Image (cartoon, rainbow, N blue to C red):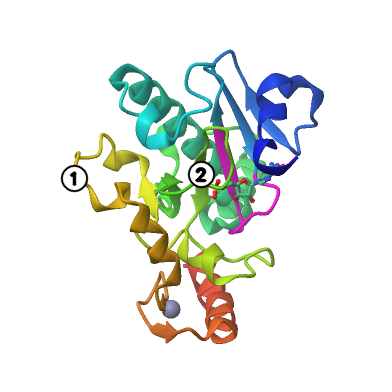
């Protein structure tokens, strides 16, 4: 429990049901975040003992390790995008009906392109993580969850406090390295989708996020 709570998944991934551990291999464990801040929120946990206790900024200074993490995060992003497509995709429902009518799977290149759900997933780390074991958030952009209850929950995914994996390696003078990065959590709210400002009105923001979610998933 506590700040070391993610260690158990790395140590014994096989002891969890698939509703908790999405997959595991020698180098990584992918899990569902226990307090999801979006409709789909996964964590990628590297198992490398020499890295798992490091701050992400330090761990990702190893170029070889960073490349490995980026490749695995890409794999998990694809998986997450597939999950969004199954949950929300219009194209896939139509396709399923068509396949059922044909009683056969069409070749992949016959499928209509549909929506690019990869683009609806963010991969990155928090400038100041709260959990000790190295973890990468793989999270749908919607920020729609009953677990999103506090200002910092929203802003930790909606300000520079969230550092996309693709921004690494970070420059030595990158502002997000500074202890003042925690100040990002206190910023006024801005809707992630339409840019509308909400000041410090969290309840209004939450209501608006619900409306945006409906449109986003149906787009
Ligand atoms: P951080 O702010 O450290 O980048 O994010 C840590 C994440 O771990 C949070 O999103 C939090 O909800 C999640 N979390 C905290 N404790 C547990 C736990 O015991 N199990 C799982 N699966 N997720 C956790
Ligand atoms: Zn909006």
Q: What kind of element bears circle 1? A: loop
Q: What kind of element bears circle 2? A: strand
Picture disc at residue 173: 1
Q: Residue 155: percent from the left, percent from the top?
A: 46, 66
| Mark 1 / mark 2, whichever is N-terminal | 2
In 3D space, how far apart are the residues under numbered discs 1 and 2 (Cα atoms)?
A: 24 Å
Name the one closer to the observer, 84 or 165.
165
Q: Is mark 2 within 8 Å of ligand 1?
A: yes
Name the one closer to the observer, 74 or 82.
74
Residue 125 occupies which quadrant of the picture? Answer: top left
Task: Identify the residue at horizontal 50%, vertical 46% (top origin).
Answer: 129
Task: Identify the residue at horizontal 54%, vertical 34% (top origin).
Answer: 44
Furthest-front residue in this view? 179
Q: Residue 114: percent from the left, percent from the top?
A: 43, 52
Task: Identify the residue at horizontal 72%, vertical 23% (top origin).
Answer: 13
Task: Identify the residue at horizontal 80%, vertical 31% (top origin).
Answer: 17
Our reading of the magenta stretch's main secondary structure is loop
Relative placement, left or right, of 50 versus 183 is right
Relative placement, left or right, of 173 versus 53 is left
What's drawn in magenta, residue-wise?
33-44
Can residue 178 be seen here? The reply is: yes
Relative placement, left or right, of 172 versus 107 is left
**Viewport quadrant of the N terminus:** top right
Picture layout, residue 46 above or below residue 208: above
Q: Which residue is mark 2?
A: 137
Name the one closer to the observer, 58 or 157.
58
């Amino acid at each position: 429990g506590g700040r070391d709570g993610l260690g158990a998944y790395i140590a014994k991934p096989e002891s969890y049901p698939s509703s908790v551990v999405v997959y595991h291999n020698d180098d990584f464990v992918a899990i569902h975040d226990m307090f999801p801040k979006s409709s789909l929120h996964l964590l990628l946990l590297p198992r490398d003992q020499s890295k798992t206790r490091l701050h992400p900024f330090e761990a990702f200074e190893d170029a070889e390790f960073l490349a490995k993490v980026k490749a695995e995060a890409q794999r998990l992003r694809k998986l997450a995008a597939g999950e969004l497509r199954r949950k929300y995709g219009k194209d896939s429902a139509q396709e399923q009906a068509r396949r059922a009518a044909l009683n056969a799977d069409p070749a992949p290149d016959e499928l209509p392109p549909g929506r690019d759900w990869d683009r609806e997933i963010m991969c990155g780390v928090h400038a100041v993580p709260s959990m000790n074991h190295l973890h990468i958030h793989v999270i749908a952009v919607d920020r729609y969850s009953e677990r999103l209850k506090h200002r910092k929950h929203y802003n930790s995914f909606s300000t520079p406090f969230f550092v996309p994996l693709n921004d690494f390696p970070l420059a030595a003078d990158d502002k997000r390295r500074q202890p003042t990065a925690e100040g990002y959590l206190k910023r006024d709210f801005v809707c992630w989708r339409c840019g509308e400002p909400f000041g410090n009105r969290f309840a209004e923001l939450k209501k608006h996020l619900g409306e945006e979610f409906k449109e986003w998933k149906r787009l």
